[in-house]
Amino acid sequence: MTGQKNAFVIRCDLRYALRMSTMIRSQITIGASPERVWSVLTDFASYPAWNPFVKSISGELRAGSRLAVRIAPSGGAGMSFKPAITELREAAVLEWLGHLLIPGIFDGRHRFELTPANGRETSFTQSETFSGILIPFLSSALKDTERGFVAFNDALKTRSEAV
């Protein structure tokens, strides 16, 4: 009887853990049009020249396709993954969903949003919602990721405003 009760408790804990999530969000105003910012954001081949956080992205930019992404936060360990693009709207939204090994272990829904602001400016928001059973164990890695988002946004602003 005790074994069955323990098994039930473990099952409930796993269901709860799978629903656990946390979000990182960073926003910046860029003195360039959404079209210009989008052009820089989606020029993946140029990332090594300017991006301090996302070292490389390759793959076809279309909904449903898989990308190959390499990130390396300052002070943190690098990571490669192959997310699928879940939403794509020209000069407005790029979103992908990636998994560590299998869905539910550690998932990340990454989103870039561009919104026109004050005429020729862009409000740029980068966010990621993380979920899965490893969330409670990865808080320090998520702090590195948050710093990476800020560095990415600052570099995107500099590059978009330079032209």
Image (tube, rainbow, N blue to C red):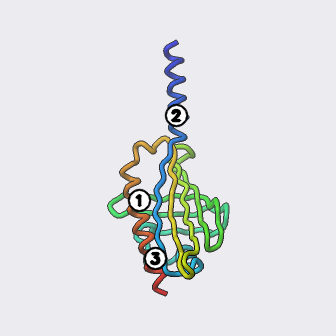
Amino acid type assigned to the residue bearing label 3 in the image: Lys
- CB-based contact (under 8 Å), mark 2 and mark 1: no
User: Farthest residue toward the left?
Assistant: 75
Label 1: few (<14), some or many (≥20) within 10 Å? many
Q: Position of residue 58 (x, y in %)?
A: 55, 69
Q: Position of residue 78 (x, y in %)?
A: 40, 60
Q: Residue at x 51, y 44 (%)?
A: 132
Of 136 and 157, the residue lying toward us: 157
Q: Residue at x 47, y 83 (%)?
A: 161
Q: Which residue is mark 1?
A: 146
Please determine whether, in this image, residue 136 is positioned above or below residue 67: above
Q: Which residue is mark 3?
A: 157
Q: Secondary structure at mark 2?
A: helix
Amino acid type assigned to the residue bearing label 2 in the image: Leu
Q: Which residue is mark 2?
A: 14
Q: Secondary structure at mark 1?
A: helix
Amino acid type assigned to the residue bearing label 1 in the image: Glu
Label 2: few (<14), some or many (≥20) within 10 Å? some
Q: Position of residue 27 (x, y in %)?
A: 47, 66
